[in-house]
Amino acid sequence: MTTTLTLPDDVRAWAVKIEKIAREQGLDFFPTIFEMVTYEQMNMLAAYDGFPIRYKHWKWGAEYESISKSYAYGLSKIYELVINTDPCYAYLLEPNSLLEHKLVMAHVFAHCDFFKNNAWFARTDRKMLDQMANHAAKIARLAERYGEEKVENFIDTCLTIDNLIDPYAPFIVRKREVLEEDALPPEPAKLPARSYMDRYINPEEDLARKREEMKKKHEEAKKRFPSEPERDVLAFILEHAPLEKWQRQILAMIREEAYYFVPQRMTKIMNEGWASYWHSKILTTCGVCNDGDITDFCTVHAGTMQMSPTSINPYKIGLELYRDIEDRWNKGRFGLEWERCDDMEQKLHWDMQLGLGREKIFQVRKIYNDLMFVDEFLTPEFAERLKLFSYAYNRKNERWEVKTREFLDVKAMLLKQLTNFGQPMIYVEDANFKNRGELCLWHKHDGQDLKLDYAKETLSNLASLWSRPVHLRTTSDGKSVLWSHDGSRFEESRQ
Amino acid sequence: MERIDSDRTRFKEIVRGRIRKNLKKYISQGELIGKQGNDIVSVPVPQVDLPRFKFGRRDNGGLGQGNGEPGDPVGGEGEGQGSGKGPAGDSPGEHGLEVEVTLEDLAKILGEELELPNIQPKGKRKFESTERKYSGIRPVGPNSLRHFKQTYRQALRRQITSGTYDAKRPIIIPIRADMRFRSFKEEVKPHHNAVIIYMMDVSGSMGDEQKEIVRIESFWIDTWLRSQYKGIESRYIIHDASAREVDRDTFFRTKESGGTMISSAYRKCIEIIKKDYPSGEWNIYPFHFSDGDNWSADDTMQCVKLVRDEIIPSSNVFCYGQVESPYGSGQFIKDLRVHFKGDDHVITSEIKNKDAIVRSIKDFLGKGK
């Protein structure tokens, strides 16, 4: 960035005050540095995911165009941007009013608390600011040496597969693959039978046939590589594809950056909900707003809480869920006794005066991610109160229609959207497909087909990385198919 | 320079590259017309984003919030269907993969692709005019400009601060000091000093297809000339045996059925020039489109005289485009070519079909007049 505006005195003073209040409320965060930026700078930072320096690539330009356009048309405005580093950096938008700055600062402290304390962030690199700058410098050097176009094309290729990672990988201790020489093939399972009936119910020749089959499978599995399907496709390519050294460097950097953002994608609802919970609490109950400010606060707050008929607002869902949890644990509306109670009148006035709410939400913010959060705390009453529904495409009417408000359907839809960030699960299944050194991937199909034109392009890119044909086993229109790409031609075959 | 600028430039280069590659297709299919906003066009560029493995959203459905019974449409009826044509988008409210380009950029791409030279304007003086724009809020003003929402908020704010707000009876009564009004700013805009006068033969022999060709061609001529002159006026004349001036919409839609007297259009054109664009400061572009079938050789002679004596002296260039129609003789272009042989103030072009539009645009604009 060319310039950073200095923080005006009143904003600076409020930053100190709000930080003190936030700590008193129990929030625990890294030192937080606020910077004042113009909206152009804000849009630029947003396009770069909050980092002032990223490697050179047109995708940031595309992102910037879309953000600026949306700002210019008044469709959206980025109020706040904070990055998960130690110290935390947060940006304030210069044309904002003092009240908006106060709100954003309170919001930011809660984000920083979340970054520092949520377990899923434990393995993130808190010096990512430097790391991103290093990557930018390294890629610039490579571009100088190997040519801008070559490097750009390779980055394009890498980016098309940067979602093929295993979100849990940072927590998996990699074991060395030891070849267990004496691993025996498993015994075929027998049907339960009394001893005198056993040879009729489990005839020996049948067992022998099964044993033979299993032995064959076992032998095949031993030869297969990887021995179990591998979800971190990016790592697999990095380790086993015949890449040049500079290519390996770039792919490694892109993988590192992709992993850095994983916890944020895993906790979008929780993180935004937590920050909204606290900005609301701090501004309305801790003497940060005067009476005249309240109407302005409501306008801004309501704007961020707005729900849409076509998507859910993580700020709103998150905030309401935390409030719901706090209320339930304050009143003791949990546990076996509560669950078993079917007297609606009694439930309505249920209050055991436990006062455990605050403690509970701090615990939740420490150990949960969005998927667990929604799975455990979304209740039918909550879904009804927020008027949630699922929608689907009606082919007959050629339009999108409200499908149902049934709690289990709504919850299943939300969980589906959160599972693997709403992206298909792809594994490496066989790196020596048909004994020809071709790569075979497997799409774990859960009812949703892949978008064919995108899949073709992606397979073609994978083929260029693997430098041999690449296959994907998936299901399309209810049939098992194998999609293959050899770098120049796509083919679909039935299985 | 900000860091992002090089990434933006690169992105725009990629988009422009895609548009350039497909420009001839866009031109001949007339795809871009009707997708035009004020100064922005949506161009259907295939896939500028990065491909990834992802779900086809059609099977997927989604989650929303709000009122509505099962079976009610989500996100407004018909949304995501463009203008009612083509398949619905992958999700409600999605508008497909389109890139927005300013008309200026589009003109630049057109210029590069067709190698059009820049125009040397005839007149240099620029006119200026002021325009009012309502963009601000102020505490005084006439009641007709009162801003209800802002006034309400001021009143609410005052009542909360002064303790007269009762949450149980939330009645807000604005007083004089709460009133807020819209206010305007005056903006100075450079005024036009160029005009395109479109003339089209709408006699019985000009069918829908011929008009479509004229429509597409004038869109691109418009786009190019607009990029050359800041603010440009357009006038439209239709004629059969007699001529009249119409608005843009009528220009492309009218179907008359009379005979054809081309001279009537030229007379009307001269009348407009004399009345509204008299000084030599104006850059004037008369374009005439017809199927080349005129009433009589007599009338054609009159046309030639009018063009030579009246139109050419006041215009930058006179352009005649002839579309092919199954009924016309196509004689007029031959006559013009005979009479204005060697005169580079008259440009003629034959447009046989949609594919010929690109070449014809180059004929007209390739001289840099």
Image (cartoon, coloured by chain):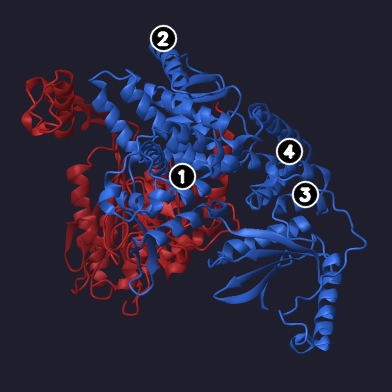
Chain colours: A blue, B red
User: What residue appears at the point 72 percent right and 82 percent down from the top-left corner?
Assistant: A193
| Mark 2: secondary structure | helix
Q: Label 3 marks which chain's residue?
A: A
Q: Identify the residue shown where x is 21% and y is 64%.
A: B239
Instruction: State yes or no: discs 1 and 3 in contact (Cβ < 8 Å).
Output: no
Front label number (1 vs 4): 4
- Callout 3 crowding tier (Cα within 10 Å): few <14, some 14–19, many ≥20: many
**Residue B127 seen from this side:** no
**Element marked by disc 4:** helix
Q: Mark 2 vs mark 1: tell me if same chain.
A: no
Q: Which mark is residue A331?
A: none
Do the residues indicated by labels 1 and 3 lie within the same chain of the protein?
no
Callouts 4 and 3 on one subunit = yes
Give the letter of the chain under mark 1: B
Question: CA gap, disc 4 to disc 3?
Answer: 20 Å
How far, Cα to Cα, is label 2 from label 1?
A: 44 Å
Instruction: Determine which of the numbered discs, if any, sits on residue A238 in the image.
Output: 3
- Residue A8 visible? The answer is yes
The residue tagged 2 is A9
